[in-house]
Amino acid sequence: MRGVLPVVLAPVLLAAAIPPAGAQEGPVPAGALLAKVRSCHPVSAGRYRTDDGARADIPVCGAKGAVFWKADLDIDCDGRPSRACNKRTDPFFLPTTAFQDSAGRQLDSAALPYVVVPGPSKAWDHRKWGVHGGGVVAVIYRGKVQYAVVGDTGPTDLIGEASYATARALGIDPHPVHGGADGGATYIFFRDSRVRPIENHREAVRLGQSLARKFVAGR
């Protein structure tokens, strides 16, 4: 989702090795969730690009109690500066996120699994579909399920972005410049859900597991 760098960055010290993807978060397998999103009923008036210059061919899809899309996974390193996410490691770094934690601080991309949604537009307005800051998202990649929250908004024409922490948990290179995944990520947003406080990942997992079971059961 980010543009091509005009210069080569000097080496910087990040979290050295990318750990393998952690154990799946919860009893609902990736396959069961993916089976519920095989077909797409578009709910967006337009389609999105994964990156600048890419073809606009990704719709937002509707399902019972959820909306979803299938895209790439670019790295959002914005928010509270950290060793992994700052102006040195990310030339596009912004010190703010669309949503804040319970103390009024910007979210920490390096620590909190969150997903970025396109900014509201005529094509699609996430707020009208029950997708709000702190909403629960199941991110699926290569057989792994990671629960996250809606933590930031992005450009109105691009889709497919998640925090450094989300990528790292899924075994994806989280580097904000050369990391990410070119495709294969599925994002399922459980409508009208909310994690309080937004930074409580354990609560996101607990609520996500409950909503995923209901979603797979068709309830």
Image (cartoon, helix red, strand yellow):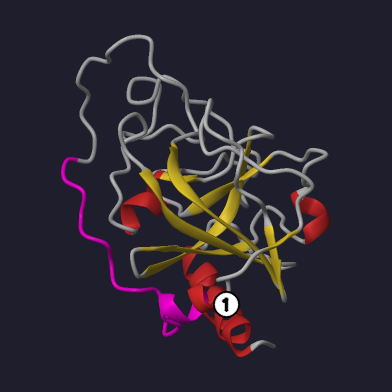
Q: Where is residue 28 in the image (x, y as percent from the top left)?
A: 45, 83
Which residue is pictured at 44% across the width and 46% down the height? 73
Q: Where is residue 13 in the image (x, y as percent from the top left)?
A: 20, 29
Circle 1: element type = loop
The correct choice, above or below, for 110 with respect to 185 in the image is above
Q: Nearer the viewer, residue 211 or 124?
A: 124
Q: Picture quarter containing residue 192?
A: bottom right
In-image side of 64 versus 144 (left or right):
right
Say whether residue 97 is magenta: no
**Dot 1, crowdedness within 10 Å: few (<14), some or many (≥20)?**
some
Which residue is pictured at 47% across the width and 28% down the height? 2
Q: Which of 203 and 47 is in front in this view?
A: 47
Q: Where is residue 178 in the image (x, y as percent from the top left)?
A: 30, 32
Q: Position of residue 213 (x, y in %)?
A: 56, 85
The correct choice, above or below, for 169 with respect to 94 in the image is below
Q: What stretch is highlighted in magenta?
A: 16-33
Q: Picture quarter containing residue 194?
A: bottom right
Q: Magenta: predominant secondary structure element?
A: loop
Q: Mark 1 points at which residue?
A: 36
Quadrant of the snapshot with the C terminus: bottom right
Q: Nearer the viewer, residue 23 or 82?
A: 23
The correct choice, above or below, for 209 with respect to 93 in the image is below
Say whether residue 23 is magenta: yes
- Please name the amino acid that badge 1 sits on: Lys
